[in-house]
Amino acid sequence: KQEVTQIPAALSVPEGENLVLNCSFTDSAIYNLQWFRQDPGKGLTSLLLIQSSQREQTSGRLNASLDKSSGRSTLYIAASQPGDSATYLCAVDRGSTLGRLYFGRGTQLTVWP
Amino acid sequence: DAGITQSPRYKITETGRQVTLMCHQTWSHSYMFWYRQDLGHGLRLIYYSAAADITDKGEVPDGYVVSRSKTENFPLTLESATRSQTSVYFCASSDFLEGGETQYFGPGTRLLVL
């Protein structure tokens, strides 16, 4: 069974800091890895999707990297803002059943002014 | 409304009652999913569907029933609600693209079973 772990569980930083959120998974045979954002009381919003053949993806101030061999992904947030405050979830698709995602429990991020 | 919607958004019911949660998407995505989110467990897959009339169990299917007679709808039924089914339920949809396609999530249904 695929286990997905996210560290840290919570993070509180002042505005402007560069952040690193970590995700690890036990089975390196993945199809893709996705990062989501969840705001309190809301659904999930997709941020980045990295295919298994890729090493990283970038969107604005966000950069996600993937190292399949070590079972790790990192989400880098540059110049954090209070609006970045949310829970960030990592999910892997093993490809055995397309679209079936295994989620980590998330990192709750608070960026204060 | 465009996108993916869920109804009701909040539901309180009693143990033993049947409850149906609705999910509707306007993109004609092939795949649809039901998850539950609980503190300490994160998101877990209940059921999924690859197309109309094709459904399969996920990680925690016991006590739930799904159907998919139309591509755009994917209702989830709790046949006889139990307190352990108190949770937040999310529906999601995606389409198939080589390399994977992101999933689009609904706003969730908060269910309380008394």
Image: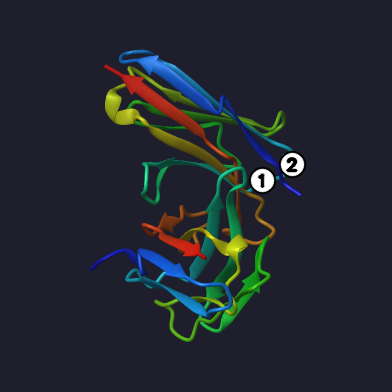
Q: Quadrant of residue B82?
A: bottom right
The residue under the point 62% across, 46% down is B41
Residue B32, given in percent of the width and then of the height, sits at 49, 68
| Residue B3 in view here | yes
Quadrant of the image containing the C terminus of chain A = top left
Q: Are marks 2 and 1 in contact (CB under 8 Å)?
A: yes
Relative horizontal placement of residue A28, taking residue B73 as reference (left or right)? right
Q: Which mark is residue A30?
A: 1
The residue under the point 39% across, 76% down is B72
Between B54 and B98, the one nearer to me in the picture:
B54
Q: Are marks 2 and 1 in one subunit?
A: yes
Q: Is residue A37 above or below residue B52?
A: above
Q: How is the image coloured?
A: rainbow
Pinpoint the chain carrying mark 2. Answer: A
Relative horizontal placement of residue B40, taking residue A50 as reference (left or right)? right
Residue B16, given in percent of the width and then of the height, sits at 58, 77
Q: Is residue B3 above or below residue B63?
A: above
- Tell me how far mark 2 sits from mark 1, CA to CA: 7 Å
Residue indicated by mark 2: A27
Relative horizontal placement of residue B88, taking residue A80 as reference (left or right)? right
